[in-house]
Image (cartoon, rainbow, N blue to C red):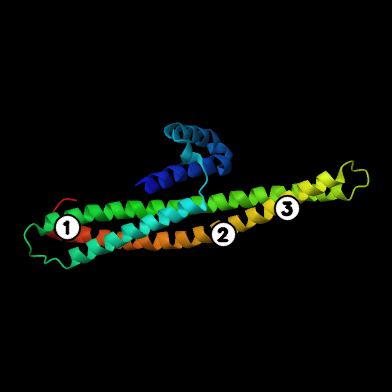
Amino acid sequence: MIHTNRANHRYLIADAKRSLLHGSADDRDRAADYYDEVVAAHTDPDDFQSYTHDELDAHSVAIDALNAAFDSMTAAFSALDSSTENYSTVAALYKAYCDIQVFATRAYSYAAECAMIASLDQQLQTAKDEFELTLLQTRMTNPREQNPSAVRAKAAALKARIDCDIAEAVSLQEKATLSETRGQALILHAKSSQAIAEEILERSGSNI
């Protein structure tokens, strides 16, 4: 559940920030108020952190386990005879299970989207670092530079960090893309089962 909550919280914060930064001028005050409300509602510092490889991997493992359990539950429910006593009660319980699955898989999709944002933010920072590297390289060739060795060392360290950051950002972007695709497929699967359960309850005259 911690992965689901974390994804939902980070997505809400990211969405509020996006509305604030990219909303129209007419909506700016409302977006600012909404952003302040969202930020005030989240007191855990981790909710404001960017997604990492390890976090997305851990969420992926958790959602795979949850989906396996859901498939087992679906198979058991499908094998149940509709004439069984209290079948509508079982169907209502299965519908509740489907609701939880939809909620969890949607959160996983949110996690993937937030990881994509983290990757793009990292790539933006890398672009800024590359500009700084260009300035350092210019200084290295300047005959008036008083300490070219120190500048050269600083440029080499920055170049190494940039190469590492680029590789990490690209890897996270690829992983986020795959997770987003899988998340959408899991949502559709859960919603399909949810619709079946709703139809059964409607036929049986039960209230959802």
Would you say 66 lies left or right of 180 here?
left
At label 1, the amino acid type is Ala
Earlier residue among tags 3 and 1: 1
> Which marked residue is nearer to the observer: mark 3 or mark 2?
3
Q: Would residue 127 be visible to someone looking at this image?
A: yes
Earlier residue among tags 2 and 1: 1
Q: Residues within 10 Å of mark 1 (few under 14, many from 20)?
A: many
Q: Dot 3: what SS?
A: helix
> Which marked residue is nearer to the observer: mark 2 or mark 1?
2
Q: Of 72 and 180, which appears nearest the observer? A: 72
Q: Distance between the residues labelled 3 and 2?
A: 18 Å
Give coordinates of residue 169: x percent, y percent. 59, 55
- Residue displayed at 48% across by 36% down: 45
Q: Which residue is tagged 3?
A: 159
Earlier residue among tags 3 and 2: 3
Would you say 79 lies left or right of 61 here?
left
Q: Which residue is tagged 2?
A: 171
Q: Which residue is tagged 1?
A: 91
Q: Of 142 and 128, which appears nearest the observer? A: 142
Q: Dot 1: what SS?
A: helix
- Residue displayed at 13% across by 54% down: 89
